[in-house]
Image: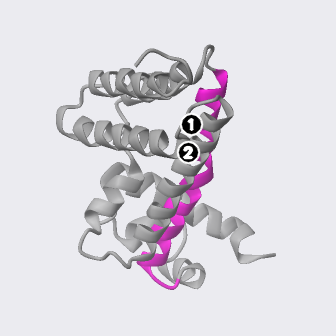
């Protein structure tokens, strides 16, 4: 069985995901992850050579599920690209109302590792953000938006900015306001729309 498909490895990553997201990577020890997974620390280190590798695996495990979630919100929304983009924010605001919501795990981890730009988890986070931006540019292009790469980057700035301000104010109204701004950006790049 390949290492990535190992049920034990998955159990460790699942435990780490719950703990790292809830408490932050710096506050969670390898001992705590092993205990949450119901394994020995030795078993954990058999599957991960370091805590750094485990942190990277935690984020890597969130990459595709997060991208699929955003895409499903976009695809399910009725209307043009502007309404579809706004739907991403509307759904993020809804999710942010949940008491266990702690913001974007990718951004929170990058903030904790700000002095370590070469950390494997920072690279995973960077790849995730780039993947989202690339997907969004493609989706916007498919919906006739002019300069889709530029608009996608502007929308990513609004999403990540709203995630950041939410950590300060804990008010999902900021995400909804960012969603209205993102819809305006998209609408302005629809061919033939008034300037």
Is residue 70 located in the magenta-colored stretch of the structure? Answer: yes
Position of residue 18 relative to residue 79, above or below, is below
Disc 2 + disc 1, Cβ < 8 Å: yes
Q: Residues within 10 Å of mark 1 (few under 14, many from 20)?
A: many
Residue assigned mark 2: 66
Q: Quadrant of residue 161?
A: top left
Q: Quadrant of the C terminus?
A: top left
Q: Position of residue 168 (x, y in %)?
A: 18, 38
Please state the extent of the stretch shown in magenta in the rendering.
Answer: 49-76
> Can you tell which mark lies on residue 104?
none
Which residue in the structure is indicated by mark 1? Answer: 70
**Residue found 44% across the figure and 66% down from its top:** 33
Q: Is residue 36 visible?
A: no
Query: Would you say 31 lies left or right of 53 here?
Result: left
Q: What is the chief secondary structure element of the magenta stretch?
A: helix
| Viewer-closest of 135 and 164 | 135
**Residue reaching furthest left?**
168
Residue placed furthest toward the right: 1
């Amino acid at each position: 069985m390949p290492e990535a498909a190992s049920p034990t490895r998955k159990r460790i990553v699942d435990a780490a995901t719950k703990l790292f997201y809830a408490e932050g990577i710096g506050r969670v020890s390898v001992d705590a992850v092993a205990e949450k997974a119901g394994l020995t620390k030795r078993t954990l280190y058999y599957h991960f050579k370091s805590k750094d590798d485990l942190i990277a695996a935690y984020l890597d495990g969130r990459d595709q599920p997060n991208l699929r979630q955003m895409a499903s919100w976009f695809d399910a929304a009725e209307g043009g690209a502007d309404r579809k983009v706004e739907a991403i924010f509307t759904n993020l605001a809804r999710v942010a109302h949940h008491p266990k919501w702690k913001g974007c795990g990718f951004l929170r981890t990058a903030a904790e590792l700000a002095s370590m730009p070469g950390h494997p988890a920072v690279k995973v986070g960077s790849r995730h953000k780039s993947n989202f931006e690339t997907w969004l540019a493609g989706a916007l292009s498919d919906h006739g938006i002019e300069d889709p790469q530029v608009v996608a980057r502007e929308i990513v700035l609004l999403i990540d900015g709203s995630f950041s301000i939410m950590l300060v104010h804990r008010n999902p109204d900021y995400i909804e306001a960012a969603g209205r701004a993102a819809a305006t950006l998209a609408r302005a790049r629809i061919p033939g729309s008034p300037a």
